[in-house]
Image (cartoon, rainbow, N blue to C red):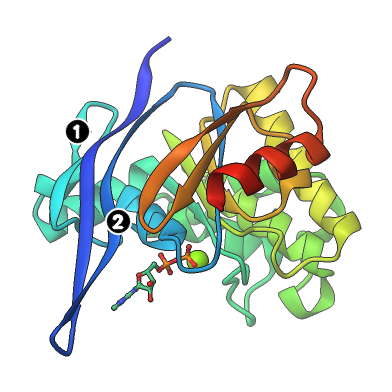
């Protein structure tokens, strides 16, 4: 299987009034095509910083992020923006849908930005809304959708460009447990049935149990990994996580 993402000795330091914060401190790992990874860690452990570096939304102080063989930190800002638009699907905790647009129009945005025609964008948007189970909701605006439905629209928007990798920052953090579980099941299905490569930041052991691998972070470093898929359940992951994250 090919490697989609390679992270090599990555560091991100912030200088804040004399102090230096090592938000990410020498992180290395690889993600193969079709893998579903959960990234766990306490608040402040560097999860969002790492995800932003993977997405090219931030640049590292040291090290490399290689996606599809392309080192994105070494690109110019313009190159990285174009690369991100065509290779990376990002899902936010707060959905980030545009409130005045319908579900279909929100999903079509990345295609329109990429220069696709209106008709083609609309057809693709409807196809991807159907793929996340929202065929009946295409003309609804975000306010008329439940949180779980809004997040599924956001996932369809991330998928519509056929990205090399999907990155999600606590995608179930604003949802109740039932809607959260639907999102985890959807992500699992996208990986298993469509071969999507997915990295999700979370602090929910029950959600992480859906992933193929759980990477545990603490103070900007990787403390270890919890393999799933065997006979480990959410409680087992929670207890291994406590040992690793401290
Ligand atoms: N822009 C910034 N400036 C200074 N410090 C930051 C900045 N962003 C994050 N940090 C610090 O880096 C550390 C990791 O933050 P973050 O990646 O947001 O953690 P998490 O997502 O795991 O809660 C924290 O100590 C945080 O305060
Ligand atoms: Mg965070």
Residue for point 76% across, 49% down: 183
Which residue is drawn at the image coordinates 19% and 55% (left, top)?
60
Foreground residue among 187 and 142: 187
Query: Seen in the image, is 41 located left or right of residue 33?
Result: right
Residue 213 appears in the figure: yes
How far, Cα to Cα, is label 2 from label 1? 21 Å
Packing grade of label 1 (10 A; few <14, some 14-19, many >=20) is: some
Name the residue at the right extreme: 178
Relative image position of residue 89 (x, y in whole percent) = 47, 48
Residue 14 image label: none
In the displayed structure image, the side of residue 211 where residue 86 appears, left or right: left
Q: Is the distance from the Cβ of mark 2 to the nearest ligand 1 atom less than 8 Å?
A: yes
Label 2 with label 1: CB-CB less than 8 Å: no
Quarter residue 184 falls in? top right
Disc ID at residue 70: 1
- In percent of width and height, residue 158 lies at 53, 50
Determine whether, in the image, residue 12 is placed left or right of residue 137: left
Q: Residue at x 66, y 43 (%)?
A: 128
Q: Is 117 located above or below residue 30 in the figure?
A: below
Kind of element beneath mark 2: strand
Residue 24 marker = 2
Figure quadrant of residue 150: bottom right
């Amino acid at each position: 299987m090919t490697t989609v993402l390679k992270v090599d000795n990555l560091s991100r330091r912030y200088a804040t009034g004399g102090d230096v914060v090592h938000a990410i401190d020498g992180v290395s790992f690889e993600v193969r095509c079709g893998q579903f990874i959960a990234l766990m860690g306490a608040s402040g452990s560097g999860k969002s910083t790492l995800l932003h570096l993977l997405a090219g939304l931030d640049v590292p102080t040291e090290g490399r992020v290689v996606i599809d063989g392309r080192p994105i930190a070494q690109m110019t800002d313009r190159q990285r923006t174009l690369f991100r638009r065509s290779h990376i699907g990002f899902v936010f905790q707060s959905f980030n849908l545009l409130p005045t647009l319908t579900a279909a129009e929100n999903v079509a945005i990345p295609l329109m930005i990429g220069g696709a025609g209106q008709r083609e964008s609309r057809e693709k948007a409807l196809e991807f809304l159907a793929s996340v189970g929202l065929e009946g909701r295409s003309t609804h605006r975000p306010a008329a959708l439940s949180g779980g439905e809004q997040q599924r629209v956001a996932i369809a928007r991330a998928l519509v460009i056929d990205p090399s990798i999907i990155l999600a920052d606590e995608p179930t953090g604003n949802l109740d447990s039932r809607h959260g579980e639907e999102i985890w099941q959807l992500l699992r299905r996208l990986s298993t049935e469509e071969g999507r490569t997915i990295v999700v930041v979370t602090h929910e052991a029950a959600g992480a149990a859906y992933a193929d691998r759980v990477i545990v972070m603490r103070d900007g470093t990787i403390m270890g990994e919890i393999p799933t898929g065997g006979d480990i359940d959410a409680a087992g992951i929670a207890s291994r996580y406590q040992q690793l994250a401290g």
